[in-house]
Amino acid sequence: MQFAVDSLQTSTKSVQALASSMDSAMTKSFEIFGHRILEQLKSLVKEEISGVLDEHKSCISNSVMEAMRVGAMTPSIGTPYNMEMEIEQYLKQEDYNKAFQEALTAADLSLVIFVCEKVNPSVLFDTTPCALEQPVLLSLIQQFSNELENKCELKLLYLKDAVMNLDSNHHVTKEHMGKILESLCHKLKSHMTSNPGDPYLREMRIVHMMAQSFL
């Protein structure tokens, strides 16, 4: 009889030990599974947020472009060489807004550089009202915020004057200025941090402060 009791106790302990071991293994598995699910959720949320931001940025760019096209009599279609000839023709007629409009709506930064190098900024910005309309100024700021390492001096010169001539009461400017200037400030700050020895650091700080004053 005692043997049977001892055997039953031993069996009970073995079952309890096995149950405890299984419980521990299941708990660990659930923790690992839960961690994996959490990481996947984080990744999905990050992708969704990134997608929304990219879509919003695209909407801003498209809206500004559309505002410029509304003022254009003809769409900007043609080879870069033909467009350069058209731009030069507008410059000869002193239709500076149209010249910049053509370059900016072409989605070709080299054309924007081309027209900027052909014009003395004082002709554009030292007049009242500014020779460039608000959508053109916004698009110029937006496009010159990119690739600051290329043609940096020229871009900073135009960025400074373009920011100074923004009219926060204009309906297009009021709608898009915040996001465009936030993006400009972010890119300037990123460039200054990554390039502490940049010879145009002082000018970048000035443009950054000017843009910040509108935010």
Image (spheres, rainbow, N blue to C red):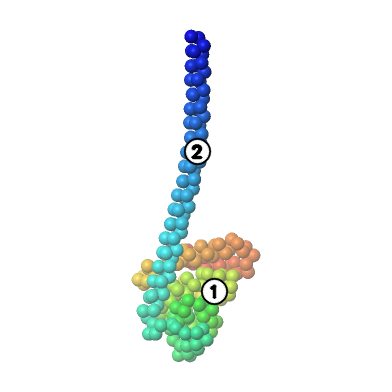
Q: Quadrant of the C terminus?
A: bottom left
Residue 43, given in percent of the width and then of the height, sits at: 48, 52
- Secondary structure at badge 1 equals helix
Along the line of sight, the residue nearer the viewer: 90 or 62: 62
Q: Which residue is mark 2?
A: 29
Q: Nearer the viewer, mark 2 or mark 1?
A: 2
Mark earlier in primary sequence (2, 1): 2
Residue 85, given in percent of the width and then of the height, sits at: 50, 89
Please identify the quarter of the rendering in which residue 59 is found. bottom left
Along the line of sight, the residue nearer the viewer: 22 or 180: 22
Q: Could you tell me which residue is drawn at 58 percent across and 73 percent down?
A: 150
Residue 45, given in percent of the width and then of the height, sits at: 44, 53
Figure check: 204 above or below 76: above
The kind of residue tagged 1 is Lys
Residue at the far right: name it.
197
Figure check: 99 above or below 196: below
Figure check: 45 above or below 194: above
Residue 120, given in percent of the width and then of the height, sits at: 52, 83
What's the distance in space between the residues labelled 2 and 1, CA to CA? 57 Å
